[in-house]
Image (cartoon, helix red, strand yellow):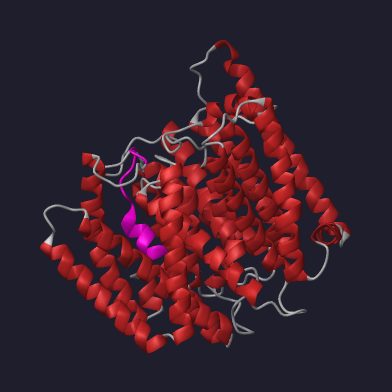
């Protein structure tokens, strides 16, 4: 409702109808999870989280459409409409599945879903061209197939809401890569944009390939490990590199080296980031050395939140001085973290078992499945505001708005807000929010810390000039802090997305 108060059009009616039916569907799905009647095995320590997940992508598309319409960027305005419609269609698809497997069939929910579906289809008919409708259906088809594959291969790793967000994002990336590969024009497009698409799709396909392969053979032997490293090199150099070469028309390795060493400031930033990475590794090794005498020792909440501050210290200078470098470096880090998770999960020698021992210290209830995803979610949450809008999408002269803070959403929501709320809430918090383990003191301190961070951003980033936007920023930070207190989903992923939506609205 906060977004619709600033951005109201025909899509708002669809989003509100979708929110009402998603509210009902969430309770139905929670009941299925409690009974163990869900088709796939989801994470058991949280509710379904369908309501916030169903609304995130449609709201993102609506604010993208509005912002790019103001800027006169027609291509991204149309893309925002496609994003909004696709998010609504996927959410509607999930509601139909929930109704179909609920016995007896809930009459009220059927009526609400039918009403929301009618509004969405009518709006799509009025707003989308034939090619855009086909694109929406393509993303939906990819989403369906990825859901059947990944949710079967990775039981208990996601809640339904988390799976919706992650699989929709991968489906969009895969569809965009296929679309751009088929319509590539020499000299068109920025290599930085293609880099993200190819790396994400390549690393996901690599994981699916090895999961299918190691289903038939033991992954913990030296022969399997050698085969893993060899096939990773073959697929990387023989598939991913040529694919990227076709899109950017130059050798990807030479381009990456030239890009990273283009200016002296970039070299200094990279050196600074390497020092922070070494510091983070030192913390991991030190904490594991402390538990050598006790196998049951687990890292405390305060210790885990150290990494939030380290990542915030990484992204802050990157956003101020060189956002394109931060964009590319985040993509490289994502690929490295996922590849290391493959090595840990499959016990690939010589580092697989060592990674299992080192990372097991930092597990919490959100890592109840076979994968450890908390650190990857942290990177995704910090990077999404940079990846989604790497360049300002606002008309000249209107940067003095809350939207100028949107790239800092990850730092504010996760790097500062979530970390401070957890540390203060677990150490000095006494008054708990009704129905949660989160405390009032933690939430209030998080809001205050984020306001101080906004002030620091104003000092160091000359492009951010908020003028009369302070009230909207305070409301946005407060709403997202309350979401952090009440959600049982992975907040590293959900909070930056919602804060960015609010700041852009």
Q: Quadrant of residue 232?
A: top right
Query: Which of these two is toward me, 258 or 131?
Result: 131
Q: Residue at x 58, y 33 (%)?
A: 346
105 shown above or below 293: below
Relative side of 246 to 117, left or right:
right
Count the marks: how many?
A: 0
Rendering coords of residue 211 (x, y %): 54, 41
Rendering coords of residue 381 (x, y %): 54, 53
Rendering coords of residue 336 (x, y %): 67, 45
Residue 411 appears in the rendering: no
Question: Looking at the figure, which quarter contains the N terminus?
Answer: bottom left
Q: Residue at x 71, y 33 (%)?
A: 226
Q: Residue at x 82, y 67 (%)?
A: 250
Farthest residue to the top: give it: 293
Which segment did they paint magenta? 43-56
Rendering coords of residue 115 (x, y %): 21, 75
326 falls in the magenta region: no
Relative side of 346 to 313, left or right:
left
493 shown above or below 135: above
Query: Which of these two is toward me, 3 or 173?
Result: 173
């Amino acid at each position: 409702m906060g977004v619709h108060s600033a951005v109201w059009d025909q899509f708002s009616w669809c989003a509100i109808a979708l929110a009402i039916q998603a509210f009902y569907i969430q309770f139905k799905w929670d009941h299925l999870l409690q009974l163990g009647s869900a088709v796939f095995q989801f994470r058991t320590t949280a509710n379904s989280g369908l309501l916030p997940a169903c609304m995130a992508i449609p709201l993102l598309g609506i604010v993208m459409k509005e912002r790019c319409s103001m800027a006169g960027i027609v291509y991204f305005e149309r893309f925002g409409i496609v994003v909004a419609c696709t998010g609504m269609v996927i959410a509607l698809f999930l509601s139909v599945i929930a109704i179909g497997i609920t016995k007896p069939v809930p009459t009220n929910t059927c009526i609400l879903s039918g009403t929301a579906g009618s509004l969405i289809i009518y709006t799509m008919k009025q707003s989308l061209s034939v090619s855009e409708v086909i694109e929406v259906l393509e993303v939906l088809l990819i989403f369906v197939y990825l859901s059947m594959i990944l949710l079967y291969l990775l039981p208990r790793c996601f809640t339904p809401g988390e799976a919706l967000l992650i699989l929709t994002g991968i489906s969009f990336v895969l569809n965009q890569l296929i679309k751009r590969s088929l319509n590539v024009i020499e000299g068109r497009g920025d290599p930085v944009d293609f880099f993200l698409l190819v790396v994400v799709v390549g690393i996901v396909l690599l994981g699916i390939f090895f999961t299918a392969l190691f289903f038939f053979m033991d992954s913990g032997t030296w022969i399997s490990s050698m085969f893993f490293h060899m096939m990773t090199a073959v697929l990387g150099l023989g598939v991913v590199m040529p694919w990227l070469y076709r899109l950017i028309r130059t050798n990807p390795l030479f381009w990456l080296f030239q890009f990273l060493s283009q200016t002296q400031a970039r070299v200094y930033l990279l050196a600074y980031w390497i020092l922070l990475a070494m510091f983070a590794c030192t913390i991991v090794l030190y904490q594991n050395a402390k538990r050598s005498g006790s196998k049951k020792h687990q890292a405390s909440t305060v210790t885990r939140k150290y990494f939030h501050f380290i990542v915030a210290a990484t992204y802050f200078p990157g956003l101020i001085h060189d956002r394109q470098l931060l964009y590319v470096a985040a993509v490289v880090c994502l690929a490295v973290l996922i590849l290391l998770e493959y090595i840990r999960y499959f016990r690939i020698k010589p580092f697989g078992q060592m990674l299992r021992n080192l990372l097991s210290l930092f597990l919490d209830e959100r890592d109840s499945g076979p994968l450890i995803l908390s650190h990857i979610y942290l990177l995704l949450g910090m990077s999404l505001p940079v990846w989604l809008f790497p360049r300002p999408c606002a008309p000249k002269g209107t940067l003095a708005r809350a939207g100028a803070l949107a790239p800092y959403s990850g730092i504010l929501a996760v790097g500062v807000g979530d970390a401070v709320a957890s540390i203060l809430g677990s150490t000095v918090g006494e008054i708990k929010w009704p129905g949660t383990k989160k405390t009032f003191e933690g939430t209030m301190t998080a809001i205050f810390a984020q306001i101080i961070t906004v002030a620091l951003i104003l000092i160091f980033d000359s492009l951010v000039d908020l003028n009369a936007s302070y009230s909207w920023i305070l409301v946005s930070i407060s709403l997202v802090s309350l979401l952090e207190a009440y959600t049982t989903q992975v907040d590293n992923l959900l909070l930056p997305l919602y804060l960015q939506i609010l700041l852009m609205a």
